[in-house]
Image (tube, coloured by chain):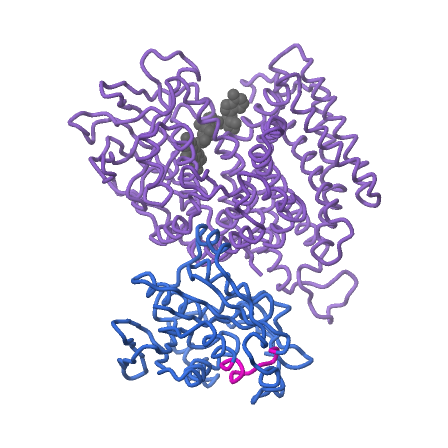
Chain colours: A purple, B blue
Amino acid sequence: MSVIMSRRDLDFVLFEWLDTAELLQHKPFDEHTPETVASVLDLAEQLSTDLFAPHNRLGDLQEPSFDGTTVHVVPEAGVALKAFAEAGFVAAALPEAVGGMQVPASVFSAALSWFHAANAGTGAYALLTTAAANLIAHHGDSRLRETFVPPMLDGHFFGTMALSEPQAGSSLADITTRAEPQDDGSYRVFGRKMWISGGDHELSDNIVHLVLARTPGAPAGTRGISLFLVPKYLVAEDGSRGERNDVTLAGINHKMGYRGTVNTAPVFGDGAFQPGGLPGAVGYLIGSEGSGLPIMFTMMNEARIGVGLGATALATTGYLKSLAYARERLQGRPVGTGPGSPQVPLVEHPDIRRMLLAQKAYAEGALALVLYAARLVDDAAAHPDRADEANAVLGLLTPIVKSWPSMWGPRANDLAIQILGGAGYTRDHDIEQHYRDNRLNPIHEGTHGIQALDLLGRKVLMDQGRALGLLGARMADTVQRAQTAGGPAAEYAALLAPRVARLGEVTKGLAGLDDPAAVTADASLYLDAAGHIVVAWLWLDQLLAVADKDGPFYDGKRSAAAYFFRRELPTVDPLLNILAASDRVTLDLDASVL
Amino acid sequence: MNIVVCVKYVPDAQADRGFDESDLTTNRESVDGLLSELDEYAVEEALKIAEAGEGEVTVVTIGPDKAADAVKKALQMGADKGVHISDEAIRGSDAFATSLLLAKAIEKIGAPDLVITGMASTDGTMGVVPAMLAERLGLPQVTFASELTVDGDGVTIRRDGDTASETIIAKLPALVSVTDQINEPRYPSFKGIMAAKKKPVETWSLADLGVDAGAVGAAGAYTKVLSVTKRPPREQGQIVTDEGDGGSKLADFLASRKFI
Ligand SMILES: Cc1cc2nc3c(=O)[nH]c(=O)nc-3n(C[C@H](O)[C@H](O)[C@H](O)COP(=O)(O)OP(=O)(O)OC[C@H]3O[C@@H](n4cnc5c(N)ncnc54)[C@H](O)[C@@H]3O)c2cc1C
């Protein structure tokens, strides 16, 4: 059995819980069948096992290096990414019209989880490329679409997202990179970016940077930001590689984890190269001036689901590896047995089981959350009449989908290290790397704190709390079905319902505060509480899909649900208490006393 | 050029495989099955030949319902059509019966120019079916090919031995078995997966092939597994610490196990 992902659990979520077979009867997904989905998952397992997992550690130990001109990445990454593109994974989820295969987001996410888990560092190049190609396909003009999308889909060009700058990370409104219009309709881009993943390497023939910049005279703040396509090499009319563009690196960052993905500080337009005899990086406007951030944000739901998925995948593989270890490693004896009796596997100790069950509850809860969100993306596409509701719920859930797995995934990896004991602290075992890799997830794509502000400051309060009401209706439906089902489901419904109600009251209370700073001062606590309540709801809903099915797999689901309801859900109460009391200890703090 | 590739659906070699206790046949229920890895080389070689010129690749498999997966995988890689031979009475067949069924199926498909097989299955690993099949079909057999070229009306193969490499030619039609050195099998792709849905797969029974049930299965078998013994559980490994004498310690270990 694979220790990368659990195919059994993916099949359960897709087919026994989310009823993917039903989804596949609707356009635009009706070319697919449960059989083709199974083959896609087989293919993901095979490629990730054969080509991605084997160099996961190598990519970490031999992190990319920069010799002042060229970035060197282990060649195994190139081989794996080539096979990934050739199999059609870069293009899979895109619409057919741009050369994609229209694979549902839920199915594609399930398939991608294998690559995240097998080798997060190498996988990132491909995922960035998919995201960038998707953006150009949707928002680029026909010339940009025709020139750049096909070679990105077949793996010859890779993509990046160049948003952050040294002085502007969370606050993108403060970026200073500028773009000056030229007579031929193109722009010249000048400025420094920071933290750009995949910003330079020799893995592909060309690199397509999507760069946020300001045009002359643009208004301050986010409304003055535009989006540009800036290739590392210009592309000639016939598609061949042209002149080197004025894009270089100031250097690369040396990270705690995710080392396989080179992280760069690119410099645009400092004259190192002079395309057409002039300094300045040639860029092409995507959309209209000033629409840069809204365009970026159309991709954000998917990107954030992607981060949640990555965190989930790393949590899952850590769980599976620590479980395999705990079944083999003999250590100690059960309480009450004498020293003469044989030692037992770790898995026999209740404290080890606690750590395994917690990981299972986090990892499988996170998988349910991520694939549920991806399914909302699919529902909106498959049922235009219900798209409005699905999108509202998705928008509300997105900060949770990004952040909950990112919080609890590293926690799961931490427990996995603990199960291995000393071995877990060594580089002989994968888990310490999973932990380091996973620790990125609460930081990029909007930090935990920024997601919390998005959830409480925007999403729940927007449209008089409409989205929260729609989510509440979905939860109420599950609770009602659980009450009808009786047994443990009804027992858990009785634990969930009052907390959902309490979250609603706390939200109202916060919304009614006079001091706007007080509303969101503890947004992170709100995100944590709301996240646990949402995941509890999805555990209950999964339990209803388990129903009275027999066998160890279903008993495992029942145990994890019991764990989550009895031990995790109650932890939201103290958080809700703090929020209800509008406690001002952090707000009123005089920072000079720290 | 019409090419037939014979493929087998086998229990995953990575899994803990076993035998059915009642009749000592391979247990195909408890472990996941897949297209035998050694047969992927045969499929790849056929696809390469077909792609280089005009040609059609038909894959044939014998096995229970789930064996259709082996055909499906080959179709996803790019083969054009499939034949799945399935019949309750086939259970327990040996290599003689297998070659008989394949021969009948290939005759029914219609005289191919080339029959390609893997060098052995990863479960039975007898490696005799190609030779038996060639004999039944009256075709020249050129086996264990690590390189294969088709030109005009002949095939040329390279067979690597311990001391020499032989170049062997045969006239078409011929049967070639290929080794795992011959190529790097492709993975299926999304396009291949979608295309495979629409490719024809026929399922044939013994009656369709005109084969008598007594000639196959356990009843018709010339060979029989008499007993099986489970491999002893894996022992704790032994760590050799290199204090300048790691090499000789390793040599001592191998000698103690009679490997050298
Ligand atoms: C490995 C890695 C890869 C990355 N890849 C990319 C990439 O490919 N492209 C790209 O554009 N960027 C990328 N980033 C950048 C990433 O998105 C930023 O690091 C992130 O947005 C945070 O910005 P910052 O690092 O400047 O931190 P800061 O914005 O300085 O934040 C520091 C802390 O302050 C908090 N904070 C900031 N503002 C507020 C506020 N208003 N209220 C409350 N708290 C606040 C944050 O939550 C955080 O805890 C990457 C980063 C890393 C580490």
Magenta stretch containing residue B98, yes or no?
yes
Q: Which residues are magenta?
A: B90-100
Q: Position of residue A138 (x, y in %)?
A: 42, 30
- Horizontal side, residue B102 vs residue A282: left or right: right
Residue at 71% x, 53% y is A556
Front-most of A246 and B98? Answer: B98
Most extreme residue toward the bottom is B222
- The quarter in which the N terminus of chain A is drawn is bottom right
Residue B229 magenta-highlighted: no
Q: Is residue A118 visible?
A: yes
Rendered position, B235 above or below A86: below
Q: Nearer the viewer, residue A31 or A267?
A: A31
Relative to B149, is B126 above or below?
below
* Residue A514 as seen in the image, left or right of residue A317: right
Quadrant of residue A380 within the rendered picture: top right
Residue at the location (32% across, 32% down)?
A266
Residue A111's x, y, as percent?
52, 48
Q: Residue furthest left?
A: A277
Please state the total of marks drawn on the protein image.
0
Query: Mostly what secondary structure, the magenta segment?
Result: helix
Front-lying residue, A125 or B69? B69
From the viewer's side, name the closer residue of A553 and A272. A553
Please report the residue visible at 40 percent of the width from the left and 27 percent of the height from the top. Answer: A139
Q: Is residue B165 visible?
A: no
Residue B87 percent across, percent down from the top left: 61, 74
Rendered position, A223 above or below B37: above
Q: Residue B130 appears in which quarter of the rendering?
A: bottom left
Quadrant (top left, top right, bottom left, bottom right) of the C terminus of chain A: top right
Residue A525 rendering spot, x and y as whole percentages? 64, 28
